Image (cartoon, helix red, strand yellow):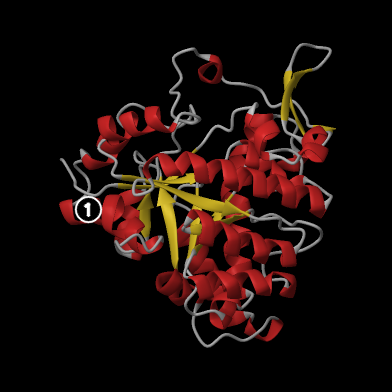
């Protein structure tokens, strides 16, 4: 089935290593992200001068046939045309590590350099390539300033946050209030995006096996991020704020919302009172991305309805589908045409205000 106006709600860029010398001020070059090999020959990331743990690389990451659109916007537009994607909302790869930078000043400079590079990347076709700002979650004054700059200068449509405990704070901490107020004022979407970066505390840390850690981190951290934003009263205080939960699938959402509704009914005395049920806040203000071939998607739609699910490709990461990512959803015979149009086009447009 061919669908017009497809919007990829979660594509990624692959920041080229040489970009940092161009976009970082000279005195900060020593903090630029780098790819190194340790004494055992394992590739490892170094960010802000710290060597991070080894993350096993799938063979697909090393393939010479990997798509080049992560760092080449013209190649990305060709791939988007071949897939039938009209617009892509873009998130980082290396930038996912920045939340683990302990020094807020260095985190701020890295975020600013990334946003400027991404702005130039998107300028290749600003109608089709849409950026999401990275901001330092360790410094709210700098975060608000950088969000305003990224939206004003680069026309970014959202701000990315990690859902994890950072600097001892969850997303319902009053520390974050200026960021939520600014995003609400600017009309940009809070994009909650996890990554198994091994440089911050995550739910899978009890395991040594990276596959186990990766299986845990995305849905578990997103569940707790949703708990913080909804049950912590953030969405009650900011009724115009839009939030999207990305790269964790959608199958967990109905069960989690049911559990939150039940807990807010029976344990209301043990938390802050809210006038609405958690599921009401989700339906009013939240979106979640689906994997194109997610088996439980029909059941999720049956429970939640079709207005809060968005399509995401994860391009060019090798655990995504390419080529054929749009067809993987559009050609399914267990979804209605109405549901496909909403997920692939209408819902992402509403989520990111891409009219």
Callout 1 environment at 10 Å: few (<14), some (14 to 19), or many (20+)? some
Picture quarter with the C terminus: bottom left
Residue 223: percent from left, percent from top: 58, 58
- Is 7 left, or right, of 225 in this rendering? left
Q: Residue at x 78, y 34 (%)?
A: 29
Query: As drawn, is 216 to the left or to the right of 51?
Result: left
Residue 140: image location, x then y, percent: 73, 66
Q: Is residue 141 above or below residue 164?
A: below
Residue 143: quarter of image: bottom right
- Helix, strand or loop status at disc 1: helix
Q: Is residue 286 above or below residue 2?
A: below
Disc 1: which residue: 341
Residue 67 in percent (x, y) is at 43, 23
Please tell me which residue is depicted at 50% across the width and 14% down the height of the picture: 63
Q: How many marks?
A: 1
Q: Residue at x 75, y 34 (%)?
A: 32
Task: Point out the image quarter for the N terminus.
Answer: top left
**Nearer to me, 126 or 261:** 126
- For image coordinates 76% across by 11% down, the residue present is 41
């Amino acid at each position: 089935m061919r669908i017009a106006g497809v919007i990829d709600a979660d594509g990624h860029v692959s920041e080229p290593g040489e970009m940092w010398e161009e976009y970082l001020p000279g005195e900060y070059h020593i903090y630029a992200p780098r790819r190194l090999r340790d004494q055992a020959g394992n590739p490892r990331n170094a960010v802000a001068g710290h060597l991070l743990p080894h993350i096993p690389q799938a063979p697909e990451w090393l393939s010479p046939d990997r798509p080049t659109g992560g760092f080449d916007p013209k190649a990305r537009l060709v791939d988007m045309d071949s897939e039938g994607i009209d617009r892509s909302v873009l998130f980082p790869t290396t930038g996912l590590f920045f939340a683990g930078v302990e020094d807020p000043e260095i985190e701020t400079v890295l975020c600013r350099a990334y946003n400027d590079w991404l702005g130039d990347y998107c300028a290749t076709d600003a109608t089709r390539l849409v950026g999401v700002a990275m901001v330092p979650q360790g410094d709210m004054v700098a975060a608000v300033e950088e969000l305003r700059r990224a939206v004003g200068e680069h026309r970014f449509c959202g701000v990315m946050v990690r859902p994890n405990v950072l600097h001892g704070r969850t997303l319902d901490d009053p520390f974050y209030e200026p960021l939520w107020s600014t995003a609400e004022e600017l009309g940009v979407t809070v994009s909650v995006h996890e990554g198994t970066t091994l440089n911050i505390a995550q739910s899978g840390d009890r395991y040594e096996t990276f596959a186990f850690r990766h299986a845990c981190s995305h849905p578990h951290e997103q569940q707790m991020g949703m708990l913080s934003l909804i049950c912590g009263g953030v969405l009650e205080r900011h009724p115009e704020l839009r939030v999207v939960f990305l790269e964790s699938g959608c199958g967990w959402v109905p069960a989690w919302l049911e559990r939150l509704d039940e807990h807010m009914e029976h344990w209301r005395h043990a938390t802050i009172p809210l006038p609405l049920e958690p599921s009401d806040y989700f339906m009013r203000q939240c979106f979640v991305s689906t994997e194109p071939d997610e088996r439980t998607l029909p059941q999720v739609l049956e429970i939640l309805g079709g207005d809060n699910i968005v399509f995401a490709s994860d391009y060019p990461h090798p655990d995504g589908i390419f080529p054929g990512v749009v067809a993987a959803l559009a050609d399914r015979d267990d979804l209605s045409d109405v549901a496909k149009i909403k997920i692939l086009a209408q819902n992402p447009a509403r989520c990111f205000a891409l009219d």
